[in-house]
Image (cartoon, rainbow, N blue to C red):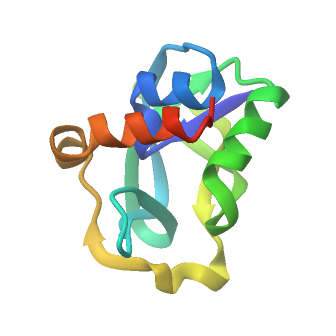
Amino acid sequence: MRLFSYGTLQFPEVLLAVTGCHLEGDKAILDDYACYTVKGKVYPGITPERDASVEGVVYTGIGEVHFKKLDRFEGDLYERVRVCVTDTEGNPLQAWTYAIKDALRDQLTPAPWSKEDFEVEHLPAFLKQCRAEGRA
């Protein structure tokens, strides 16, 4: 199975800490969704939004055991949904992703989430927290 990640799981070290597996991902785009920062958090959430798009990474080879760990990591704010992403060669790929639940969209700020800012400002502490919470 495939996983489309647009947030913290784009970082292989976070994926490893959460699932216990190391996978190489390929760039992909998810159309008709937008990515915003979650209120009071350093991580993002996506929500359907017409004419928007989200850049991310698609991983192949995610098993059900890994998805159980990912479900626990994502928590009650997100739901796992099936989407169609486009790879860099223009091919459509079916994948799972985690989107903010419709009833919880008010938890998103209007501020777009920045992968680059997260990497510089928050990645080391976030990774340390993932490991400390035993999410792996």
Please count the marks in the image.
0
Residue 91 visible in the displayed image: no
Q: Which residue is drawn at 44% across and 42% down?
A: 129
Image-based side of 20 in relation to 81, left or right: left
Q: Is residue 92 above or below residue 13?
A: below
Q: Which residue is drawn at 33% across and 58% down?
A: 42
Q: Which residue is drawn at 45% across and 32% down?
A: 57
Q: Is residue 63 above or below residue 107?
A: above
Q: Is residue 57 above or below residue 96?
A: above
What is the quadrant of residue 123 in the picture?
Answer: top left
Residue 15 visible in the displayed image: yes
Image-based side of 83 in relation to 89, left or right: right
Q: What quarter of the picture does the N terminus occupy?
A: top right
Image-based side of 23 in relation to 136, left or right: left
What is the quadrant of residue 128 in the picture?
Answer: top left
Q: Is residue 122 above or below residue 36?
A: above
What is the quadrant of residue 8 in the picture?
Answer: top left
Nearest the viewer among 2 and 50 is: 2
Q: What quarter of the picture does the C terminus occupy?
A: top right
Q: Where is residue 81 in the image (x, y as percent from the top left)?
A: 71, 55
Nearest the viewer among 94 and 47 is: 47
Q: Position of residue 64 (x, y in %)?
A: 84, 30
Q: Residue at x 49, y 62 (%)?
A: 46
Image-based side of 78 in relation to 68, left or right: left
